[in-house]
Structure formats: C-alpha cells, structure tokens
Image: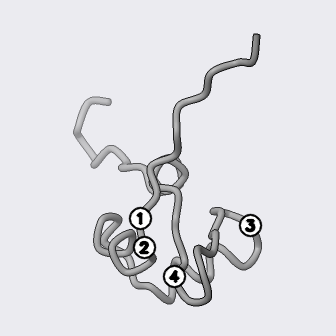
Amino acid sequence: MPRRTVPARRAPLKEAASYAKLSVKTLRRYGAPGKITLSRNGDKLILVDLDELDRLVCPIAAAGDGR
C-alpha cells in the first residue's frame, strides 16, 4: 500500500511573500540556490510551498524572553 502524504500548501509568489513578510525578490533569491522550492504552474505562475517557508523563516527568542 502506498504511503499517504499530506498535500503541500502552495501559494503564488506574491501571496507567499506577503505571508512571510518578505519581498518577492527575496523569495526568488531563496529559490535560486534551493533554500526553498519554487514550482511553475503554467507559463507564468510561480508557486511556493508554504510549509518550506515556515521552516525557513522561524521566529527567534528576544533577549529576556526566557526561551
């Protein structure tokens, strides 16, 4: 029996940039060396896996935060 996987949460490049509070240019720069996977849907639409983006852009604890 094949293993079940959770489908990827994908969003267009502009929406993903807004979601991560980054610029579209920064996401393209992350995609070039392979830090995140950019996939093309059709001729122009570029999609970003939001789960990968969540793993890449993670919050850090502030000084005195106790974490």
| Location of the C terminus (image quadrant) | top left
For label 4, the SS is strand
- Which residue reaches farthest top? 1
Residue 13 image position (x, y, % from top left): 45, 77
Viewer-nearest of discs 4 and 3: 4
Could you tell whether 16 is left or right of 2 in the image? Answer: left
Q: What kind of residue is marked 4?
A: Leu
Q: What residue is at 50 percent from the left and 89 percent from the top?
A: 25
Q: What kind of residue is marked 3?
A: Gly
Give whichever of discs 4 and 3 has the lower sequence position: 3
Residue 11's mark? 1
Question: How far apart are the alpha carbons under marks 2 and 1?
Answer: 4 Å
Give whichever of discs 4 and 1 has the lower sequence position: 1
Question: How far apart are the alpha carbons under marks 4 and 1?
Answer: 10 Å
Please say if the residues under marks 2 and 1 sit with CB atoms less than 8 Å apart: yes
Please say if the residues under marks 2 and 4 sit with CB atoms less than 8 Å apart: yes
Give whichever of discs 1 and 3 has the lower sequence position: 1
Q: Nearer the viewer, residue 67 or 7?
A: 7
Residue 25's mark? none
Question: How far apart are the alpha carbons under marks 2 and 4?
Answer: 7 Å
Q: What kind of residue is marked 2?
A: Pro
Residue 12's mark? 2
Residue 62 image position (x, y, % from top left): 28, 48
For label 2, the SS is strand
Give whichever of discs 3 and 2 has the lower sequence position: 2
Question: How far apart are the alpha carbons under marks 4 and 3?
Answer: 18 Å
Viewer-nearest of discs 4 and 1: 4
